[in-house]
Image (cartoon, rainbow, N blue to C red):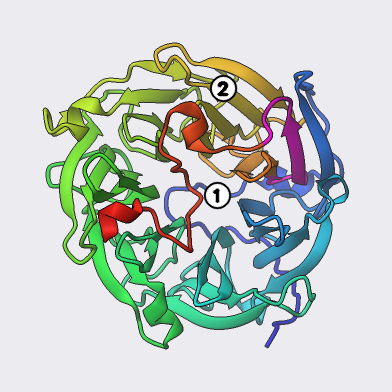
Amino acid sequence: MRNRIGRALATSATLGMIALLPAALAAVQGEPEGEDKGHSENVSALAHVQFTDSGFTATDIELEQDLDRPFAYVGRAIVEFGFDVIDLSDPSNAGLLTSWRIEEPELHQPFGGMDGKIFWDAGRNYYVQSFQFGGGGADADLGAIVFDVTDLPDPDGVREVARISAPDMPGGFHNIFIYKHSDGRPLLLTTTNGGVVNAYDLRLVLDGQEGLVGAIPIPEGMTGAGGPPGGFYHDMYAAYDPATGQDKFYGGGTGGYHIYDISTPEEPAHLFSVAGIPTVPWGHTFTPSPDGRYAVGEVEYQYAPLRIFDLGPGQSGETQVINNSIAAWTADWKNLQHNHEVRWPYVFVSGYEDGLWIFSLEDPENPTTVGHFDTYPGPPGIGLCSDNKCNGAFGVDVRNEDGLVVISDSWTGFWTFRMDGFDGWNGEDYGMPNISSVQDWENGPAPKEATD
């Protein structure tokens, strides 16, 4: 049953480490005005969908990868609680297909819909939307809702099938990642307010069970700024390592970035950490290269660049702690960058006030900018984090089949892009495993000989 579309007023409620919504945000309406940094000649905007003139509303973004399912999903928060589905059957003429909103929005406190991910199982297509609601309102223990979206593009083709709650750790799931495990299970990995990443077997969830099969803790001895006692995770990624035959977890949180063997999700084993770096008290987003040798790490504070780490000594077992970066990159030193997608050698960045940026790690010690497009021309300094720089390009995704790039801008809405010469991605074309955030739902992550 589809819930009716509703609108909720922003309040002063906060969750996790994000600070109060400045009063100035609510006072600025209409089209943003400020510095336009333009774009590079090799990056073209195909379409732009403006959601609202009410300020911060769009959160993360997820692209379906099958060209026969031309849909993108955008989380909606602060002034809308749910998600939108964008029709990309013509990427140059993208438009809103349908929306889903939580029931009785007036009873809920922000944020709302945060991160979203797709998965396939048993011939059906699913979308999982994470939620964070304030403790003074409804659904404070709600973490995520699973939707069957197989019937899209029928506007009524979004059907709720399960809800995942964490009553012992209220506050919702800020970020999620869905991984096709080498044993065949679709695993939902979630942040929590309890210092661990929860792992859910989505087949069990679809069967009406709780589905919780494991929890990945912060390694012992890690300290850092912010967060609850016992630590916290903020973002996570999982990938199969062909060199070792292991399923590996990569998480940013208290102390830095942590890598675990999750070949048996019920018994995660800590492998090594990137920690003890004076300017990295905690990790935000952490994404490895397809072979796991290098990684891009973000820290959420003004002036912080993206750092490049050589994970080789940790992956080989030479050390359990890597305490230095080999390079750094930023679009504008006065700002900070946010989420990113690695399609080696390219890194696609949603750079908050800087918009979409793309840089290359062809030489990991010397990252170079290759393209950009400003999706957020202002006003500057009106954001949701303590330094007020967290507004603008929030989420980014890449469709591997044809190279389409999408951005969810918290203020200006949804965008589609093309970069000249980038017409799709397969890691093997670059001498890498064909591994990214995109999952092979039919075959799984492991080479066939590794699973026989």
Query: Which quarter shows the N terminus?
Result: bottom right
- The quadrant in which residue 337 appears is top right
Q: Position of residue 173 (x, y in %)?
A: 44, 62
Q: Position of residue 431 (x, y in %)?
A: 43, 28
Residue shown at 44% from the left, 76% from the top: 164
Mark 1 and mark 2: span between their CA atoms?
Answer: 32 Å
Query: Which quarter shows the C terminus?
Result: bottom left
The residue at which mark 1 appears reads as 20
Please give the range of residues in magenta. 408-423
Secondary structure beneath label 2: strand
- The quadrant in which residue 32 appears is top right
Q: Is residue 206 visible?
A: yes
The residue at which mark 2 appears reads as 359
Describe residue 223's horizontal placement relative to residue 44 as left or right. left
Residue shown at 63% from the left, 18% from the top: 370
Residue shown at 32% from the left, 37% from the top: 282
Q: Which amino acid, mark 2?
A: Phe
Q: Which amino acid, mark 1?
A: Leu
